[in-house]
Amino acid sequence: HELQETYPNKSILLAEVGWPSAGKRVGAAKPSRVNQAYFVRTFLSYAKDNNIDYVLLEAYDQPWKIAAEGRAGAHWGVFDAHRQTKKWPLTGSVRELPNWPYWAVFALLIGALSQAIYLHHWPDLSIVRAVLFGLCFQAWGAGLLWPYISLTNHYLSGLGLTVWLALSAIQCVLFALFASDLVELANVTWHKPRRSFKGARSLLSDKAPFISIHVPCSNEPPKIVIRTLTSLSRLDYPNYEVIVISNNCRNPMRWRPVKAACAQLGSQFHFIHRDHCPGFKAEALNLARNSADKRTQIVAVVDSDYLVDSDWLQTLMPIFENPDIAIVQAPQDHEPPGLNSFKRKCFWEYAGFFQIGMVQRNEANAIIQHGTMTLIRNAALEQVGGWGEWCITEDAELGLRLLTAGWKSAYVAKSFGRGLLPDEFNAYKSQRFRWAYGAMQILKRYGPELLGFRQCRLSLAQRYHFIAGWLPWFADAGGFLFTVGALAWTVAMTVVPDQLPPPIALFMVPVLFLFLAKQVRGYALYTMRLNCTRLDRWRAALAGLALSHTVARAILTGLITRNAPFQRTPKDISNISPREALTTATTESALLIAIMTVTIGYSLRCDLGDPSNILWLLILTTQAAPYMAALLMASSDAIERWRTPPQIASVGQVTGSVSSDRHAITTAIRSKPTKATA
């Protein structure tokens, strides 16, 4: 109007008028299909009423403009880029997703199918709980499909489509992990364990099945091994032998005292030594199996640092009266850590798996066999060919092989023995690396059976528990790759902010939500199943988070290699200095510094008024959490070493007397029906 008043004899043309249907938000201006329709309709009416000439920007979407103008540049058209479909009508209602009913039906079917599978295994669920769980599955199904629904509003190149589909696949893994966490939370909350094996004290007689107890040790402090053997000599069971297999130890000062102790403990105790065992613990156990008494019906395995309760065998042996049972497993428990903050974190992180995860897996006959406090039917062990020397987690591999052959397992949540906790953060990480790498070895060999591509006797529930149990480790590997990619992308955005926007919220919000949901779920499970303080629950969460980088490294290494050397978990009291303890998290600290530097640099360059930038900064902060946790664990270890100066461990410091240790453990650990306590 002002121009017409100033130049009354001139014709005025508005050469570019329009609104994008998708793209980056600018202040209160939000690109969307609905907003585009509203603007164009309103403007056309206004222009007609006021006799305004204009050129509508534009007829068709132009994907080539993305490189110069960003995503919004491609979405100014009234028609799509294929020139076939009009985005919205000139009259009537407008939908942001025109085909949303079809996607809604698809999401409902996914949610309903997931709910039906769950109700098939738990048919006694109340109506209210079934409806609540169904709503969760419906929301889960919608979230799972959302990346593919949103794909219809994007113009992507071949590379862009590949990246989009890759991110969508990774997000599917995250949603699968969330679904498994949801199922576990529901099972622990609503269902009491139905498959319970409490055991019973058997009658002691000479006709009791003969048990061969195998104790592998490799370069262990002899005092620790002798303590274990002394506790085994006091078992309340008539028919058993103990075979100690010293392997990969060339220091006579380590194994000769153990040999002498076996001779002193009596004819039940036998000693085997091998300087070199290429198959490590599995080969040592096969040596013991071949040397066992011919009367052996049950093979037991105990780690060389365990104090074993005297009623272990007589309590659990009656479970083998069921001829289908091949494995009877007790928890891999540890001695109380006292006031040592670092070891308390490790202790409760271990306890969570054995008092929550293993109890739930036992319901489906899908436990992970462990290489200590385990009893195995010798006939089953012979049937499957003994211990697998190709795998560095020979215990878990044997358990899966027995289940694949049709045998059953039993898990008793009560502890019958307790070993030593890793004495330093590096040992803690080394053990978890071995577990995760071994899982990759197992998955590469038994993947077809677990995924249903090769026939075996595993049930659907057993397959689910093995895959779901290893899924968090794959998420850790994916998280590491995401962190590396996020660092590179953030550096690029900082250098050329006008050309590279933050990733869309579609792929960022689920990452934040699932990270927070996992922490809440872990805290809730610990509250229900373990009788520990609130602080100890967060300590356990911190310890688990601190292992993320180690697990990621193991999974990625396992993907590209076939064999890794067996790394034993040291049982020695470590005399490293506080400074050396801090260096056990050097790699994690370097990554933490890199993330913090990039995050601060980007926050100084970006527009903090843009919600997408705030969201991206939150994502970077979340990615820093595992590396911060690792640094805190190393710092906790260093602080404990600063409080307690290095010293040479005496017999009392390392082991104490068997009687005093057993009394301390008995008074420190009180069993409850539903909660583990220390």
Image (spheres, rainbow, N blue to C red):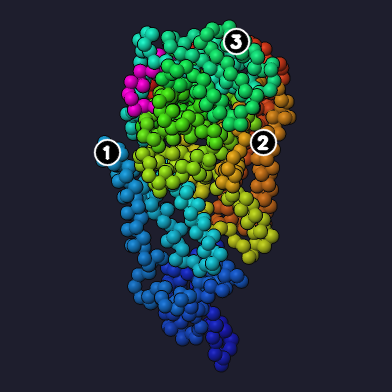
Q: Which residue is mark 3?
A: 261
Of tags 3 and 1, the one toward the viewer is 3
**Where is residue 436 shown, x and y percent of the image?**
54, 38
What residue appears at the point 42 percent right and 43 percent down from the top-left corner?
450
Give the image location of residue 417, x and y in percent.
49, 18
- For mark 2, does the 10 Å Cα neighbourhood hold few (<14), some (14 to 19), or many (20 or more) residues? many
x 43%, y 83%: residue: 49
Q: Observer-nearest residue: 183 or 231? A: 231
Amino acid found under the numbered disc labelled 3: Ala
Q: Earlier in the sequence, mark 2 or mark 3?
A: 3
- What amino acid does circle 2 point to? Ala
Placement of 633 over or under 273, stated as above or below: below
> Label 3 vs label 1: CA separation?
56 Å
Give the residues in magenta.
313-326
Question: Toward the viewer: 40 or 111?
Answer: 111
Gap in angstroms between the C-alphas marked 2 and 3: 39 Å
User: From mark 1 to mark 2, how far is it between C-alphas?
Assistant: 47 Å
Q: Establish if 322 lies above or below 115.
A: above
323 part of magenta stretch: yes
Badge 1 marks a residue whose secondary structure is: loop
Query: What residue is disc 2 on?
Result: 585
Is residue 107 within the magenta segment? no
Front residue (pair 75, 587): 587
Q: Furthest-bottom residue in view?
A: 9
Q: Secondary structure at mark 2?
A: helix
Name the disc covering residue 123, or none: 1
Q: Main secondary structure of the magenta part?
A: helix
